[in-house]
Amino acid sequence: MKYPLFSLASSCLLLAACVSQTNVPANPQGMMHGGQGMMGGSQQNNENQGMMNHGGGATFLPGEGKDLSVLPEVQTSQVVEIKDGDMIMLKPILVRKTINGKSFGMYGYNGEIPGPLLKVKQGSTFTVDVQNGIDLPTSIHWHGIRVANASDGAVGMTQEEIKPGGSFRYTIHVPDEGMYWYHPHVREDIQQDMGLYGNILVTSADNKTYAPVNREEVLMLDDLLLKDGLPVPYGRDQADFTLMGRFGNTFLVNGDPSYTLNAKRGEIVRLFLTNAANTRTYRIGIPGAKMKLVGGDSGRYERETFVDAVTLAPSERAIVDVLFEKAGRFSIENRNPTQTQPLGTVIVAQDASSPSYAKAFSILRTNADVSASIEPFRASFDKTPDHTLVLDMTMMGGRMDSTGSPQVMGGNSMMGGIPPDGIEWEGSGVNQMGMMGNMMQWKMIDQPTGAANKDLTYTAKVGDKLKIRIINKKDSPHPMQHPIHFHGQRFLVLSENGVKNTNLIWKDTVLVPAGHTVDILLDVSNAGDWMFHCHIAEHLSNGMMGQFKVLP
Ligand SMILES: [Cu+2]
């Protein structure tokens, strides 16, 4: 098979052109894909890359042309307690946000970034009136919740986009406890990046489900790409940064670039983490504190485990209990193999926390109810996969390699190698070459038939236990990780590269590193027409999505 590919020469020419347009001095290190030159991950480095954006396409920024002073100032997230039968309103609007002394337009649900934290008891049903107060068509997807199909918010599949000034009513039933989130499902690369995201905490009917803690805190993680303190414009007609996705250079926790949490000595804080970034995979750690992994996408693991850090791909959640044994300042860090970046600070006071839950914290609980919910699926773990899905991409518009052999962007080419763990933790020069969707095609391909993206439909019926093997090709033109998300259903991650997963949890998104093979088992439980797609916003915008038809 032959791929129309960029040759190295044309890649470099393009990069050179971008550099000369923006008068950024060429930084050969910065051009390397995941190379050591980028490992510092300094803000300066990233800002330089940010300047190399856009190959001349029309751009977009929220509220552009509007007088900033008339926009309401962004508010912090408020808690909305929802009872069964309640109706709430979510209105995305333009807001004014100030970071490091620079103000610009962003979006906020009800003017808040993150949007309101919706707290609701498992088994409840509520309605949400959405009124579109922004300058783009929108929708809301209730990520991870097994909602009725008509309320999935999937534009182009379950509903038309909500035009500016328009409205839509969602009916949300929450069958599963855990931390979920909501975001638009049209031009996520702009709208989600610019502040449209919020959490839904579905609390269990049984208050003994989780160990006692002193406090619960909700942390939504995001990164913004700023240049001279202002957002780098987005592609107006299609997502830019299509290759690696848009990496930010400014980290936000709950919309705050300098997040601070005050705690007492001995306090145990339960952190609900959600990765709302377009493409960045985080690895969150708090050196000096003790961390216990309790839950993830949809509730709890079979068994709690002590961990040094948790990896979170875009859209994934983690629930961790953190014990601060000593007084002092603790850094919440993105600590991955390439760098350590501070995201926020926990200041622990000398006075002792009361009551002390240290004893409960020291016990690693097993969740028999979670194992019991998985039990009916175990007989299907080792069956032959029902489907095999290949993640791949092709480049367009570039020159063919003179030898006719695939010119890999990544691999052993000049662009650097595939990272040993198959994850691009940070952007690089390649990312910033102004690549638009018409220059490449990200693909989800059904292996036996070759059907890809919009031509790919899987059909199943409620009650099926569908085993899907996902192969992320290591020799694609740009091998990188893809977080694969299924709408409307839940699944188990059975194995990675043949190694069985022995501590299961119900999930809606799985990170498949470059060159890795992951087996999942879908609990086909929710009828309708659903999407499954890569949750890197720019890859989805590029069409990396299939259709999943579930018959009643
Ligand atoms: Cu992807």
Image (spheres, rainbow, N blue to C red):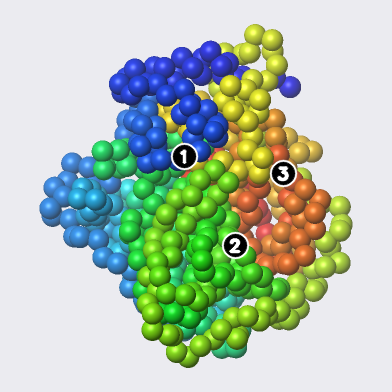
Q: Which quadrant is the N terminus positioned in?
A: top right
Q: Which residue is mark 1?
A: 40
Tell me which numbered mark, 1 or 3, is placed earlier along the sequence: 1
Residue that appears at 24% across and 54% down: 97
Q: Which residue type does callout 3 highlight?
A: His
Residue 440 position within the rendered picture, expressed as x and y whole percent measured from the top left: 54, 28
Of the residues tagged 2 and 3, which is closer to the observer? 2
Residue 136 position within the rendered picture, expressed as x and y whole percent measured from the top left: 32, 48
Q: Which quadrant is the C terminus positioned in?
A: bottom right
For residue 65, above or below residue 98: above
Q: Which residue is mark 3?
A: 516
Q: Residues within 10 Å of mark 1 (few under 14, many from 20)?
A: some
- Describe the element under mark 2 as helix, strand or loop: loop
Q: Residues within 10 Å of mark 3 (few under 14, many from 20)?
A: some
Q: Which residue is mark 2?
A: 308
Tag shown at residue 418: none
